[in-house]
Amino acid sequence: MSKKDWFLVLLVMIGVISVGASFWIFQPGVPKTQVLALSPAKVSLSTPTAIPVVKKEVFFSPTPALAREVTPTQTPTLESTPSPTPTAIPVVKVANPRQESGDFQAGMAVVIYGNDQEFEVKTRKLLDRLTRLEVNSLCLVFPLFQDNWTSSTVWVDEKRTPSEERIRLFVRESHKRGFTVMLRPILDEASLMPDGQWRGSIKPQDKKAWFESYTEVILGNAKLAEEEGVEILNIGTELSSLEKETNRWLKLIEAVRFVYHGQLTYSSNWGVSYNVKFWDKLDFISVDAFFELDAPQQATVEQLIAAWQPWIMQMNRARAPFNKPLVFTELGTRSQTGSHQKPWLWEHNTPVNLEAQRIYYAAACQASLNLVDGIYWWSVGLDPPSNPKEDPGFNPLGKPAETEIRRCFEMAVATSSPTVTATPTPSPTREERKEVYYEVKEGDWLFKIAQSFYGDWRQWPVIYEANRGIIQKPNLIYPGQVLVIPK
């Protein structure tokens, strides 16, 4: 090899060594004073020198579009880099939360089956939406099961019944917003229908075993309700064939009271004898109010209110012996023409009619507000209708009935408020008032009377203030009372 070739080889070796040294010296985070000669004598197999690894850190702001990549330029230390403070998820608060147990339950039934992977996100979205409808109470309905209509065992399905974790999440998210919560386990009917039966007609082969099994399930719900501060527990729904088992129900109530200190209720089905003798041991009476209304398919609000009157009278008679508040734990109808005639039916074989549902909501509210201490509209789920305009179902979200929910609960809260007063105006003389007298009729209420005399239901406080001597509560007036109607 020539001297020239040796010279070129020497230059290449010097270049390689220089590049390697530069790479080592300028590694981020390695002080230049620590650079060691790359001599085999400096390498120890027993105590290897760790080569520092510097990872690239990525910081994310709450908004994905603002995510930024940061390359560290300082020597790593044992102290961890502070994480960004998580942004609190905003919640929408209930406008008129209940303050006392006797306050009106402006409610919505929320029916949930299964354990949706997006349960938390969907729950928050639904609850925020319901706050905007003046809802202050939620009834969480979830299924229990038995094998058939004669089975003596009630059980919880791990897949179809929401998990305890998800029920707790629903309760906590509801409470964050100011909702009152009712837990309502309900016997699913899928296994009963093949035999032409429903939950109100079950006949367990061993009633003692059935009640022991059912009590065990309800006690599990009661303990959860106590731990989470749930305000109301519904101990049963539409179990008509077992309602005469008074002693067994009393034992269940006693067991539940031992572990749970909130309010208890039981929901009877509409149109039965209402011979529920254990109602007096509960805090309020509940009825699922799918009353059949005798009115034309294209009925008006006024016609439906008239059709409600026989049922209103029946309800007054049913609750009289107990002297308890009455709550409709289910009230609603499907978005189909004529659905008011049999509101409980799941299919009417008639066209989709959103206006029919709205009219029913308006009439049901006006007819029943003087009677009840709470209404839970039936019903919504975690998934709203994908196309409300074409949806024939019960769910009112995205439909005209939504506006009636808000209007109804605005009126309910106004009439139940103990501090309601009319807008102050100068007191006219008796001659200036030219008072008119009106005798209250069946189905009347202050809103309806104000609408009739003043053309505006919002003027009801004027009538209320003029009759304080005979009206104890704005939402309680009775046939035969004679009211002064100021001009």
Image (cartoon, helix red, strand yellow):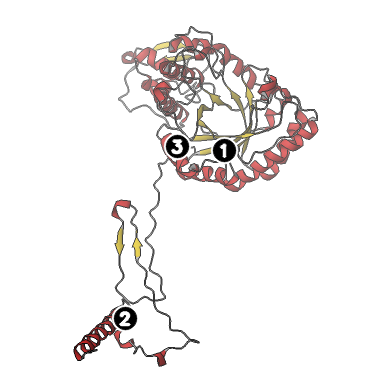
* Label located before the other in sequence (3 or 1): 1
- Label 2 is placed on what type of residue? Trp
Q: Report the Cα–Cα distance between label 2 and label 3.
A: 58 Å
Q: Quadrant of the C terminus?
A: top left
| Residue at image mark 2 | 24
* Direction from residue 320 to residue 304 in the image, left or right: left
Q: Report the Cα–Cα distance between label 1 and label 2.
A: 59 Å
| Residue at image mark 3 | 126
In depth, the one of 91 and 258 nearer the eye is 91
Q: Residue furthest bottom?
A: 41
Q: Quadrant of the N terminus?
A: bottom left
* Label located before the other in sequence (2 or 3): 2
Bin the neighbour count of mark 3 within 10 Å (Cα to Cα): few under 14, some 14-19, many 20 and up.
some
- Label 3 is placed on what type of residue? Leu
| Residue at image mark 1 | 114
Q: Residue furthest top?
A: 296
Secondary structure state at the residue bearing disc 2: helix
